[in-house]
Image (spheres, rainbow, N blue to C red):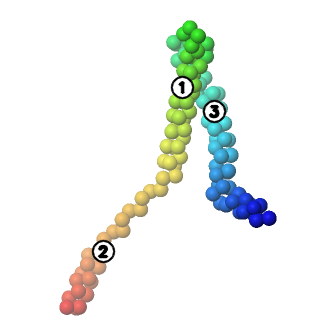
Amino acid sequence: MGFFKEFRDFAMKGNIVDLAVAVIIGGAFGAIVSSLVDDVITPLLLTPALHAAHAEDLDKLTWGTVKYGKFLAAVIKFVTIAFVLFALIKAMNAAIKKKEAAPPPGPSTTDKLLMEIRDELRK
């Protein structure tokens, strides 16, 4: 029975549960970002650029038997996803960023005078 108890303790550690939640949320977020890239950004930005370059179907570009179009499409998708993630994280950091607390003001002139009087009385 010790083996199962040890496994249960291992599986229920906070780190394991946090990691599992992060993986699930990461998968869901990946689907959101992929949809954003495939359904919004690609039709708005990439499709007009490909039409201007006379390469409407990027996957069909070949050089002999080398299908470099698929590789190029994967690179473009990666760069686009990386840029979208960068922009989202930058926006989130800007929204979350807390203003640094201003240093407390120095003593007023009255306080300085009282400190001088105190120091003189100590002498």
Q: Which mark is drawn over residue 75?
A: 1
Rendered view: 53 above or below 27: above
Name, please, the residue furthest toward the right.
1
Q: Quadrant of the N terminus?
A: bottom right
Q: Mark 3 points at which residue?
A: 34
Image location of residue 50, percent across then percent down? 55, 16
Q: Nearer the viewer, mark 1 or mark 3?
A: 1
Residue at 56% x, 21% y is 71
Q: Residue at the location (53% across, 46% down)?
A: 92
Q: How far apart are marks 1 and 3 (CA)?
A: 14 Å
> How dense is the environment of label 3, judged by Cα within 10 Å: few (below 14), some, or many (20 and up)?
some
Mark 1: amino acid: Val
Sequence-earlier tag: 2 or 1: 1
Q: Mark 2 points at which residue?
A: 107
Asked whether, in this view, residue 70 is left or right of residue 98, the answer is right
Secondary element type, mark 1 = helix
- Give me the disc on residue 1: none
